[in-house]
Amino acid sequence: MDVSEVLRAVKGGVEVDIMVTPNAKRPQVGEVDEWRKRLVVKVQALPTEGRANRAVVELLSELFGTRVEIVRGHTDRQKTVLVPLDMETARSRLEGA
């Protein structure tokens, strides 16, 4: 599946739909889940007291090279993050992961 299916251009950047797997063995950005149409993101942190959310922001900020922000789904495994980049830059960094 093409990563462009999880990207959406919005004012201020690009939104990325993700599916978070907390308590994973190692943090990683995986493939696009074809059924959910979300990018799979695994973090080692537990989903308590915002630890997993902080780990997601840290991992994706490192991947994209800029600070990302969770805009929807703070208490859910399905989240949407805002990346303050243009569509082509976000897509190329995501495909290079």
Image: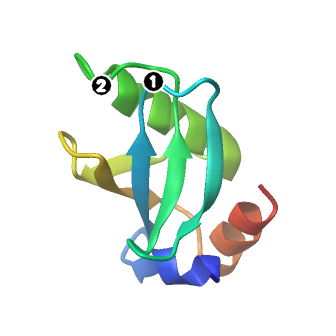
Question: Percent x, y for residue 86?
Answer: 59, 74
Asked if the residues shown at circle 2 and circle 1 are in contact, with their CB atoms under 8 angstroms apart, the answer is yes
In the image, is 41 to the left or to the right of 37?
A: right
Q: Nearer the viewer, residue 29 or 14?
A: 29
| Residue identified by numbered label 1 | 23
Q: Secondary structure at mark 1?
A: loop
Residue type at the position of mark 1: Asn
Furthest-right residue in this view: 96
| Residue identified by numbered label 2 | 47
Name the image colouring. Answer: rainbow
Quick one: label 2 or label 1, which is nearer the N terminus? 1
For the N terminus, give its image quadrant.
bottom right
Q: Is residue 60 visible?
A: yes
Residue type at the position of mark 2: Pro
Question: Percent x, y for residue 35?
Answer: 42, 75
In the image, is 72 to the left or to the right of 22?
A: left
- The crowding category of the residue bearing disc 1, from other C-alpha atoms within 10 Å (few below 14, some 14 to 19, many at least 20), is some
Q: Residue at x 36, y 32 (%)?
A: 53
Question: Percent x, y for residue 9?
Answer: 45, 81
- The answer to which image quadrant residue 11 occupies is bottom left
